[in-house]
């Protein structure tokens, strides 16, 4: 009983930590973007995406380190599906998201290409170490292209030397708090679920998958309510690219990854979801509330059909 009570307290505390961390991260990221003339979209696609994607990286690399290489692909694919269907679905329901031309033409196309490449690597049932190295290389190329053409940001002129340092510090503290709170949330929620007799498979497929995507959800929701749509969309798109190229690439370099039939089914579902998502953005230049509801509905359909 005491363990359950403690888990419930930690559950509430972790949610509070997530929100506080997200507040610090968003204000720090916005200040950093202004200070160095980099667009908020690029900051979201890189620094913020890497930070909010750390839980997926930790879970995936831990699976490889403990010999459960078959779980690595499934975890990343599941998290990416949740990011698009649930995170962006919820965000769009709160407020319709305007979409910049560069996000669609560069990053939307990059997201589709990333998913296609990973599907091609996984279709034979194994992601080899060589394929992992290629994925990592492509991620580096993508990052280089982002900062080479960072575009729309305006550099903020200031005589105060510590502005950039303080912004970076605030962003870093926010990331640490978010990642730590996300891990605490998963542990506490798992304890509560077990206390109510919920199976290990159900816990893994729901609590862990959604729990590792909680940082993306909190940051994206808070960003859009603060009028930072570029940061919100960039966070999710960037996190998905980090997961597929960066996290899976590194995991495969460490050890060849087995791809289960369930993970492969999930990967096909992700590919369809990504293509529909990007085409929607391309034609409408925004993500409406109706489209957000459709994204959430697609996750319900996935569960009913048992994909991934």
Image (tube, rainbow, N blue to C red):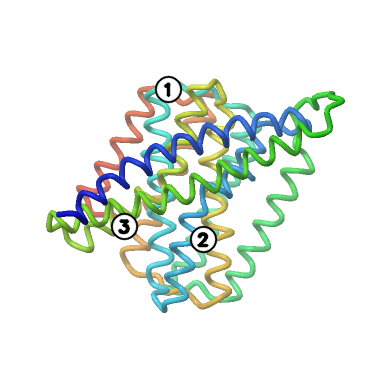
Which is nearer the eye, 174 or 222? 174
The answer to whether residue 292 is seen in the rendering is yes
Residue 77 position by quadrant: bottom left
Residue 28, x across and y down, in percent: 64, 34
Q: Which mark is residue 308?
A: 3
- Residue at left 51%, top 41%? 236
Q: Secondary structure at mark 1?
A: loop
Q: Which residue is mark 1?
A: 288
Q: Is residue 233 above or below residue 5?
A: above
Which is nearer the eye, 250 or 28? 28
Distance in Å between CA atoms under marks 2 and 1: 29 Å
- Residue at left 18%, top 58%? 194
The answer to whether residue 276 is seen in the rendering is no
Label 2, residues with CA under 10 Å away: few <14, some 14-19, many ≥20: many
Q: Mark 3 or mark 2, which is nearer the start of the sequence?
A: 2
Left or right: residue 46 versus residue 76 is right
- Residue at left 32%, top 35%? 296
- Furthest-right residue in this view: 159
Q: Mark 1 or mark 2, which is nearer the start of the sequence?
A: 2
Label total for image: 3
Q: Is residue 238 above or below residue 105?
A: below
- Residue at left 52%, top 63%? 248
Residue 118, x across and y down, in percent: 51, 61
Left or right: residue 192 versus residue 153 is left
């Amino acid at each position: 009983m005491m363990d359950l009570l403690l888990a419930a307290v930690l559950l509430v505390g972790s949610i509070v930590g997530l929100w506080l961390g997200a507040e610090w991260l968003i204000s720090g990221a916005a200040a950093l973007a202004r200070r160095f003339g980099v667009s908020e979209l690029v900051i979201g696609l890189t620094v913020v995406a890497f930070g909010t994607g750390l839980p997926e990286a930790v879970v995936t690399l831990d699976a490889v380190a403990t010999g459960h290489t078959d779980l690595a692909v499934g975890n990343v694919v599941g998290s990416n599906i949740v990011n698009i269907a649930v995170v962006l679905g919820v965000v769009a329901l709160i407020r319709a998201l305007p979409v910049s031309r560069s996000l669609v033409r560069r990053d939307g196309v990059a997201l589709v290409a990333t998913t296609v490449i990973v599907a091609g690597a996984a279709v034979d049932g194994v992601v080899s170490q060589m394929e992992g190295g290629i994925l990592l290389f492509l991620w580096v190329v993508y990052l280089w292209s982002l900062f080479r053409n960072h575009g729309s940001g305006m550099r903020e002129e200031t005589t105060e030397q510590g502005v950039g340092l303080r912004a970076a510090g605030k962003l870093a503290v926010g990331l640490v708090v978010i990642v730590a709170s996300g891990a605490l949330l998963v542990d506490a929620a798992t304890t509560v679920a077990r206390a109510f007799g919920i199976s290990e498979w159900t816990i893994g497929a729901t609590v862990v998958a959604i729990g590792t995507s909680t940082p993306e959800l909190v940051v994206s929701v808070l960003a859009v309510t603060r009028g930072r749509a570029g940061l919100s969309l960039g966070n999710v798109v960037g996190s998905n690219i980090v997961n597929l190229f960066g996290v899976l690439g590194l995991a495969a370099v460490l050890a060849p990854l087995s791809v289960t039939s369930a993970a492969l089914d999930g990967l096909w579902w992700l590919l369809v979801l990504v293509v529909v998502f990007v085409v929607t953005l391309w034609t409408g230049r925004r993500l409406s509330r109706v489209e957000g509801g459709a994204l959430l509905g697609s996750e319900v359909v996935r569960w009913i059909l048992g994909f991934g």
